[in-house]
Image (tube, rainbow, N blue to C red):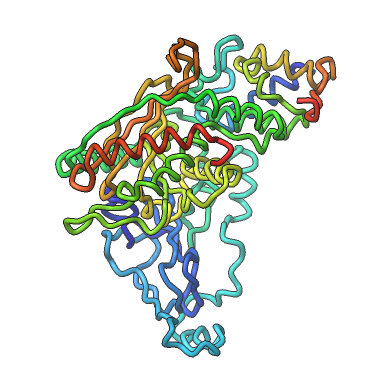
Amino acid sequence: MPSLGADMEAGTLIEWVKHPGDVIAHGDIIAVVDTDKGAIEIEAFEDGVLETTVIAPGQLVPVGTVMAMIRPTGPGQPAVTPPAEPAAAAAPLASEPAPAARPARLRVSPVARGLAATLGVDLTTIAGTGLQGAITREDVERAAAAAARPGAAAPDRLAAMRTAIAATMSRSKRDIPHYYLSTTIDMSTAVTWLQAENAKRAVPERLLPAVLLIKAVALALGEVPQLNGHWLEGRFQPGNGVHVGVAISLRGGGLVAPALHHVDRTGVTELMHRLQDLVARARAGSLRSSELSDATITVTNLGDQGVEAAFGIIYPPQVALIGFGKIAERPWASAGSLGVRPVVTATLSGDHRATDGHRGGVFLRALDRRLQSPESL
Amino acid sequence: MPEGIAAIVIQALTRIAPEVNPSAIESSSHFRDQLDLDSMDFLNFVQALHARLGIDIPEADYPRLCTLESAVAYLSDRVAGTVPTPDPGSR
């Protein structure tokens, strides 16, 4: 059972997506696990062949428990070995039906599908409890009943998430010596560019200011890599890419901060689509394991709530968190004259074990500079 | 037509905020405050209306989509063609 963030202690297997004998590539989804952050798709860490599954759907196990055995097909394996061969060799171990016979991933009984259509229940948001994780009539009825009671949806999950957040944030405040910096950034160039850009774009292609902020953070981290990574085993370990965790509040309470991968190398249009998809899946409770475990920094944007500045708590083992407030018009002095400009307050919460305020200041200055050239984001 | 558009607007909203009781949406109060929508929710709302009604909705017109009343009035005009679709080339 992989750790899907510092706040996770255990998970319940919902279903095996891959079965004994299946050939697995790095990044393939092999299982779905229920956590307080929803049904998480577990991705393979390496290439190989799924040899045996150790735990069964429905089992709740602590983080670190062996769930399955994967035989690696690393460089030691002859390159000419066709993938089908190890699969066939492992097949006798399998007690599951032949993988080829499996239908599309979402298993739904015909009765449940009809009922979902009648009740207006989105099947992709339901965790099935039937055979192999199939969605049953009861699952649909339960989902419909939960949806009908505002605020009462999944109180257990919300309580569990609250407990997990409490534990992680307490640990962060106990273990991480935070320092806080803030700066106010002139956003007139970025806002003007964004308006002109969005006027040219069809509705589905339009950008939110949040995308520019996230991209600018990623590029500024390229200049100050000391803020991008993890504090592990008593030392800073740089991230293996710029994977920005985005704090997403969930309807009904709680939050998750799944990662957008390689933000520094992603164009703003692509990033916008990925952010939109990530927010939708976070709120539907269907994230992937890499999204919950890979973030090398977190960005929180509370501008929509009209907040002026957000001083966040670092999500361990990360070493920094960037906060943004509302982009709002303010009086602004520049070159000896006073004008009105849209500005945003950016904050940095830094881990003083990994960096000092000077380094943090360099980062905020780089962030400001990046936002003055929105066309280069 | 306005009633059909009101239904479309409400459907788009309740897809974003599934816990909201459609009949509880007040016609003149702001969605953002009433339904706790953030900018991503609002973008999804505009995209849903765009997909459903097949009309362009310029960003400058977003303020007119802030309440049920004004959204229905605006969208009805746009669908009826009384507000011309802006030519993207001239912008």
Q: Is residue A289 visible?
A: no
Q: Quadrant of residue A158?
A: top left
Quadrant in the picture for the C terminus of chain A: top right
Answer left or right for B12 relative to A32.
right
Q: Residue furthest front?
A: A336
Answer left or right for A163 relative to B38.
left
Q: How many marks?
A: 0
Q: Quadrant of residue A150?
A: top left
Residue A13 vertical placement versus A48 (above, below): above
Quadrant in the picture for the N terminus of chain A: bottom left
Q: Residue furthest left?
A: A174
Answer left or right for A290 relative to B1.
left
In this view, the residue in front, A316 or A140, is A316
| Rendered location of residue A107, percent (x, y) | 56, 58
Residue at 79% in and 20% down: B78
Q: Quadrant of residue A321?
A: top left
Residue at 60% in and 17% down: B66
Q: Is residue A259 visible?
A: yes
| Rendered location of residue A233, percent (x, y) | 18, 59
In this view, the residue in front, A314 or B82, is A314
Residue A338 vertical placement versus A138 (above, below): above
Residue at 40% in and 63% down: A57
| Rendered location of residue A218, percent (x, y) | 44, 45
Answer left or right for A226 relative to A204.
left
| Rendered location of residue A105, percent (x, y) | 57, 60
